[in-house]
Image (cartoon, helix red, strand yellow):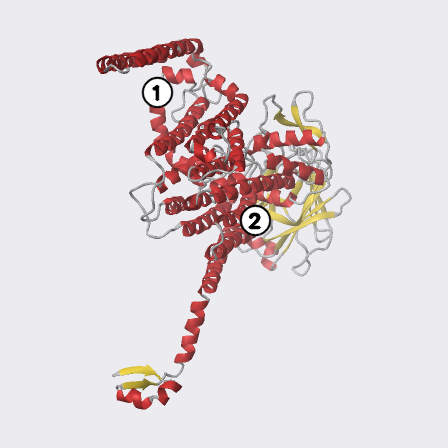
Amino acid sequence: MRKVKCSKANIALSPIIMYNKTVCKQPKAGEGFMQKIKDFCKRHRLLWLTLLLALAAAAVAAWAGFDLGQRVDNQPVYEIVNDDYTRTVVIPATADAATQDDGTTGLYLPVPLKSGQRIYGVRLDLTTHNWAFRQGTLYAALLDADGNAVANGELDCITIKDDTFAAITFDVPYTAPGTADAEADYDLANPNMTLRLWYTPGDDWDVYHLLGLWTDADTSQQMTRRNANGTTDSIVGHPALQYVVNDSGSWSHVISRLLGVLTFAAVVAGFILLTHRAKLWQVVLVCGAVLGVAFAFLTPPLVGPDEYTHLAKCYRQSSTLLGQPVADDDDMLLVRSCDAPYFKNHTGDIGIYAYKEMLEHLGDVGCSGETTVSSDTYVTADPINNTLYLGQIAGITLARMMGLGFHGMLLLGRLCNLALYLALAAAAVNIAPQRLRGIFAGVALLAQPLQLAGSLSADAAVLGYLFCFTALCLTLRTRPARWPETVAAVVLAALIGPAKAIYLPAVLLIFMIPDANLALPGKRWPVGPIAKVLALVLAAIGWVQVNMGAALYAARDVDTVGILRAGGAAAAGAALLALLYWKIRRDPKKKKIFLGAIAAVVVLAIPVGLYKLTHMWGGLTPEQLVGSIQENGDSIYTYSAGYICRNLPNTAKLLLRSFSAQGAQWVQGVLGTALGEPIVYTVDASWVLGVGFILALLAAALPQAGETVPLGHRTKAGVWGIVLCVIALSFVTALNWTPINYTTIFGLQGRYWLPVLPLVLALVHHNRTFAVQKPAERKAVFAMLCLTSFVILQGAGLYATFQMPS
């Protein structure tokens, strides 16, 4: 017997239903309402998922902010004024617990304050005379020369420990008049302020157990004690005193809320865009902008990779554009007076106080545009590749025209650099072949590219140019090019050449495009070969102009003349052999003998050439090795090209040690879990996030089952050759920075390999072994957004709580 739900039609046909042994099933009470709820939830499942995701993102951001506040809020910094103390002096109390301040009672301590110095409180060495149950409140007032209180603070006496320093924080920080001088010392003999101390007893027991202050016995200084009964005592000595010169307060709330809102917006916006089938380039543009702004605030000033050098170059070009003098008579960079306190020739500071300083001064305006103060940065005659600093120069110039302070100028320069990178990255995603767009979107949203783009680093433009060029070459391999695309390929190649020396091999990607795809319809000109040769020539010219000096320096101890002679002889010999081969190519017997002779010559030439190469110009003498050690322990000699050739075993051992000791750091540098300038600070996010990045990249790269593999064996081999050349050149460059007494390579960072990461993932995509059943690129891009957001939230805690190793 079959059951059906009751309806008007079923009731009308009840005789037929009963004849067919079908029973009309009555709905249970509430079943219709529950079904409506199920249908509603099913129809709006994306809405519920979005709300659930928003709640999760908000919870993670809130926890990150709460945890950061617990660790760094209200942390003081002390500066010693006087650290000599041999006796104690009684601090007077008011007449009773009801009298908080009678206006006169107190211990009056003359204290010095530097010109322009800001203090947040005082720290005193107090004694309770072993009375552990003290109650009441200790008060402090800072008085100016006229006796007016300019700052006030209080401390609950129950927190005071016997013979221990205790800090009294003022309600409002006080800044002394005048210009700040960090090099000045405290002049105890000439105090310019007065510190008044008194306390209110909590009960009668506090009256009998006196509260004391440790001082020295210097007779040149007089303190005054005014008691509640009207008597006055004159006491000699200086108090054991420290100033609270900084305090973290609750600034962590500001940075954590800012980063929390931005990461929340990126994750939720990314989910909405991806689930509503938005194009991947739109996801990169929107979410990359939000996360990039977060990185611009996350990275403390001048803490981005080599950011202080990039700032100096951009500032120099900005001054030229604005018609301001660039350098003084000693070739030191001239800066605005408001920039001088923050302009450095080294990596900036990190920690919660770096965030505090940045946020306090972010809104500074009204700065003079004249460059009148000499900085510590030397202006060199080296040419600047302005194509790598278009965004930064524009932002810094605009900020100076608007009169923004240093931190506002730095932020605007970072944001303009981010805008240039995002425009190029989104263009690369849009240009790339459909099946590879997930790869380019995933790489563009990695933490490392966004971190570089959110700083003043020139690598952001380099990444953008190479991403666009790579995507264009991969696309034009499969379809004919329009003439603007051919022009774009040549222009991008010309921009890549002078960008960085190690990326010149990437220009060879243009040769993977068939000549037919570069041809102009209806034209007989060989546009394809012309475009390829032109791209290579322009890139080579730019490379020579910018990098030839560095290349010659790296080869400073190489027998260049001998190598040129050997190369010329080899070229002449190759030409003669080619002519001989042309004459005997039709005779199989002679051809076989000829090829055998060539093989024998090559076999003999290899050890001879290797011997000559490893014995060029001799080596360093023991006296040179001993005399080359500097004060910091580094040798003045590095792994130059000649030294490498003469010391191949030592070079091989150094590289092997480097792989085991630094390999994980290189991977972190590619992914972006190593924050800031890793050579100076070790700020590493969780390795779990690194594993997640790798899995997300693989998910975006793996092909769908049954997908054809368009890249041939020769093309794959060529692409692998380009990738390996870039990596090898990065090692050679880093070796040239490495002193010969180091045991591991110096200066090599994984971010140098980011431009070829899309190529590696494209090769993974064209493999014949691994595949996925369904495309996972959009899920991988969303995972990338979440992981990068985690890096930002964790990075704020790592930066704010960083402590240099002792």
Nearer the N terminus, badge 2 or badge 1? Answer: 2
Q: Is residue 706 above or below residue 531?
A: below
* Label 2 neighbour load within 10 Å: few <14, some 14-19, many 20+: many
Residue 273 x, y percent position in the rendering: 50, 55
Q: Residue at (46%, 27%) from the top-left corner?
A: 529
**Is residue 238 left or right of 429 when viewed as pictured?**
right
Closest to the observer: 264 or 46?
Answer: 46
User: Which of the 4 image quadrants contains residue 240?
Assistant: top right
| Residue 429 visible | yes
How far apart are the alpha carbons under marks 2 and 1? 48 Å
Q: Residue at (43%, 78%) from the top-left corner?
A: 33
Looking at the rendered structure, the secondary structure element under dot 1 is: helix
Q: What residue is shown with label 2?
A: 255
Q: What residue is shown with label 1?
A: 650
**Is residue 410 left or right of 565 when viewed as pictured?**
right
Residue 521 x, y percent position in the rendering: 50, 36
Closest to the observer: 758 or 287?
Answer: 758
User: Which of the 4 image quadrants contains residue 98?
Assistant: bottom right
Q: Is residue 796 above or below residue 600?
A: below
Q: Is residue 602 above or below residue 370?
A: above
- Looking at the image, the residue that sits furthest to the bottom is 15
Q: Residue at (37%, 14%) from the top-left corner?
A: 646
Quarter the N terminus occupies: bottom left
